[in-house]
Amino acid sequence: MKEITRKDEIIKTAAKLFKEKGYSAVTMRDLATAMGIKAASLYNHISSKQEILKEIIISLAEAFTQGMEQIKMSNNTCVEKLNKIVELHVSITSQNTFGMASLNNDWMHLEEQLDYYLELRLNYEENFRSILKSGIQNGEISNKNVEVMLFSMLSTLRSLYIWIPNKDAINVKKLSAQLSNVLIEGIR
Amino acid sequence: MKEITRKDEIIKTAAKLFKEKGYSAVTMRDLATAMGIKAASLYNHISSKQEILKEIIISLAEAFTQGMEQIKMSNNTCVEKLNKIVELHVSITSQNTFGMASLNNDWMHLEEQLDYYLELRLNYEENFRSILKSGIQNGEISNKNVEVMLFSMLSTLRSLYIWIPNKDAINVKKLSAQLSNVLIEGIR
DNA sequence: AAACCTAACTAACAAGCGTTAGTTGGCTTT
DNA sequence: AAAGCCAACTAACGCTTGTTAGTTAGGTTT
C-alpha cells in the first residue's frame, strides 16, 4: 500500500514543473525529459496530461476538506479552530509545495473535475466563514468585516507554497504558531 | 496624450484573457477573436505576444516601485507608512485587476525583461521589510518574526486582484482602512 | 521453456501554435 | 486627383503540441 509507483514519480515530477511554469506551459516532452524518458513512454503510466493535473489537485483539495471537517466537529473555541486551520495549511503545504502551486494556479485547467473542485472549495470557505462568525458572536473575535478577515487569512494561507520552500527545515508547529499569532493578534 | 490606441485595447483585452487562463493558455487566435478580428491583424499593432505581457507587467511593477519610493521618502510613522502601502495596493489593483493577475501569475514568462522585473520586486520587498524593521525598533510594531509579518501582509495585498472584482463599487479609502485594520490590529 | 508483465522505445498523426508576407478598401492629408 | 496611412484581410510558413500504434528488451511467473 505504501510503495511508490512509476505513476507517482511522474505526478511528482509534473507538479514540480507545473510550479515553475504552470500547467499549460509544461509539455509532455518537458515532463518526459525531466523523467529521463521519451514522451510516448509516459502513456504507459498515465492516460493523459489532464489526468496528472486531476491527481495533483483533487487529492489535495480532498485533504483540505477532510481536515476542515475534523476541525469543524471538534469542541474547541473558535480561535483554537483557527489555529488548527493554520496548522492544516502549514502541514499539507510543507509536505507538497509543488502540488499546492497547481492547486492555486492551475485549477481552472481542470476539465471533468472542475465543478467538483469548485464545490469543495466553496464548501471549505463556507466552513471557514462560519467559524469566524461564531467567534464574533461569542466575543472571541472582534466585530470587523468578516469577508475582509476571511480574505486576509485565506490569502496568506494559500500563498504558503511560495514561501515555505525558502525556509530551511520547517518546524510545522513552530511556524504555525508564529503565523497564527500574526494573523490573529496583528502586528501592533 | 490621453487617447486610447488600438494597441491599448489589445493589451487590455489580453490582460482579461490572461487572468482567466494564464499567459500560456491564451493563443493569439483567442485574443483576436475576443477583439473581433483575425490573428494576423494583431501584428499591425503589437510586435509579439511577449510584448503584450511585458507591457502589462512592467508598467504595473514600475507603478508599485514609484509608489513605494514616495512612501519611503515621506515623514510618516511606520504604521502610517504601512497604511499607505495598503492603499497603494488597493488603488492600483482596483484600477487594473486583470493586469494584476498577470503580474502575480505570469511574470515567469517574461523573457527580455525578467531580470528587470525581479530587480524591481526585490527592491520593493526590501523597502517593505525596512519599514517593518524600523517600526519594531522604535516600538510602533510588536517584536515578532519580521519575515512572517512581511509574508502575511504581502500575500494578502498580492491576492487583492482575486477579491476586489467581487466587491461592487469599491471605495478605495474605506476598503484600505478596513484591510489595514485587520492586517495591523489582528482579528481578536 | 512458455507465457506474461513492465517500462521503455521509434515513428508518426492531425491539430494547433506564433508569426510573416503581401494585399485591399477606406479615410485623411497633400 | 494623388499620395499616404490605417487597420483589417487571406494564405501560408515551419514548428510544437498531445497522443496513438506497434515494437522490443529484460525480469517474473507459470
Image: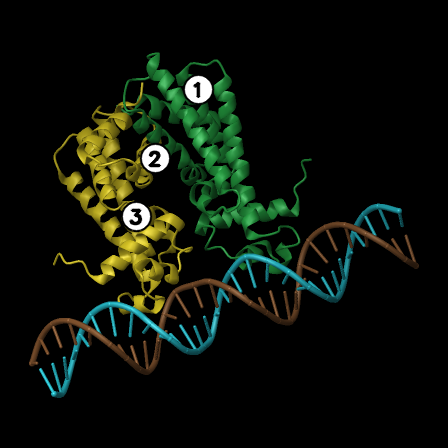
Chain colours: A green, B yellow, C brown, D cyan
Chain identifier of the residue bearing label 2 in the image: B
For the point 61% across and 46% down, the residue is: A9
Chain identifier of the residue bearing label 1 in the image: A
Mark 3: give few (<14), some (14-19) or many (20+) Cα within 10 Å: many
Badge 2 vs badge 1, beta-carbon distance below 8 Å: no
**Can I make out residue A95 in this image?**
no
Estimate the x, y position of residue B22 in percent, counting from the top left. 39, 51
Above-or-below relation of B161 to A126: below
> Which-is-in-front pick, marks 3 and 1?
3
Mark 2 = which residue? B151
Q: Is residue B20 left or right of residue A118?
A: left
Estimate the x, y position of residue B125 in percent, counting from the top left. 29, 41
Helix, strand or loop at mark 1:
helix
Mark 3 = which residue? B98
> Which-is-in-front pick, marks 2 and 1?
1
Gap between marks 3 and 1 measured at Cα: 34 Å
Q: In this view, does D8 lie to the left or right of C13?
A: left
Mark 1 = which residue? A81
Q: C4 or A126, which is in the foreground?
A: A126
Gap between marks 2 and 1 measured at Cα: 22 Å
Q: B47 or A174, which is in the foreground?
A: B47
Q: D9 or B149, which is in the foreground?
A: D9
